[in-house]
Amino acid sequence: MPTKISEDLLTDEVDKRFKEFYIRYFLKIKKFIDIYLNDVSMSENIAQDIFIMIYGDRYRLVTDESLLPYLYVAAKNKCMNELRRRKTMIRYSEDAEYRFRT
């Protein structure tokens, strides 16, 4: 049975690795998302959502290299969802002025 000290050390190491991963890739993913959405605020929110999702599974992470393609696919999928949401809002909006502003 692992001791509390070794569990704490493992947690600290995993958190440290995640922090390094976040620092290394957050801006790249945010810029990638902004290419699709052209909305800096929404791009940052979506990038944060992706990293929060990964943080929830941080104990199962293998390497940064195996996660990089996953980050880009997750970012693209979230962008497509956001673009569909925007399209739906425009389609069903009764405010014609709103349609022409977006």
Image (cartoon, helix red, strand yellow):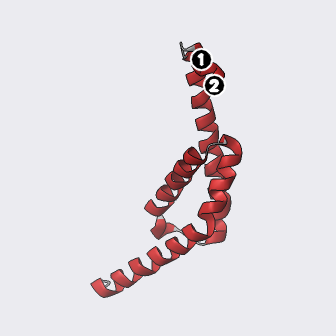
Q: Is residue 15 left or right of residue 46?
A: left
**Which residue is at a point 51% across and 55% down the rendered structure image?**
48
Residue furthest right in the image: 35
Residue 28 vertical position relative to residue 1 in the rendered view, above or below: above
Is disc 1 placed on a helix, strand or loop? helix
Q: Quadrant of residue 23?
A: bottom right
Is disc 2 placed on a helix, strand or loop? helix
Q: Nearer the viewer, residue 35 or 40?
A: 40
Whether residue 3 is visible: no
For label 1, the residue is 97
**Which residue is at a point 58% across and 23% down the rendered structure image?**
88
Question: Which percent across, then down, holds residue 58?
Answer: 47, 67
For label 2, the residue is 101
Identify which amino acid the numbered label 2 is placed on. Answer: Arg
Q: Label for residue 52? A: none
Q: Are the residues flagged by discs 1 and 2 in contact, CB closer than 8 Å?
A: yes
**Which residue is at a point 54% across and 17% down the rendered structure image?**
93
Question: Which percent across, then down, holds residue 92?
Answer: 55, 16
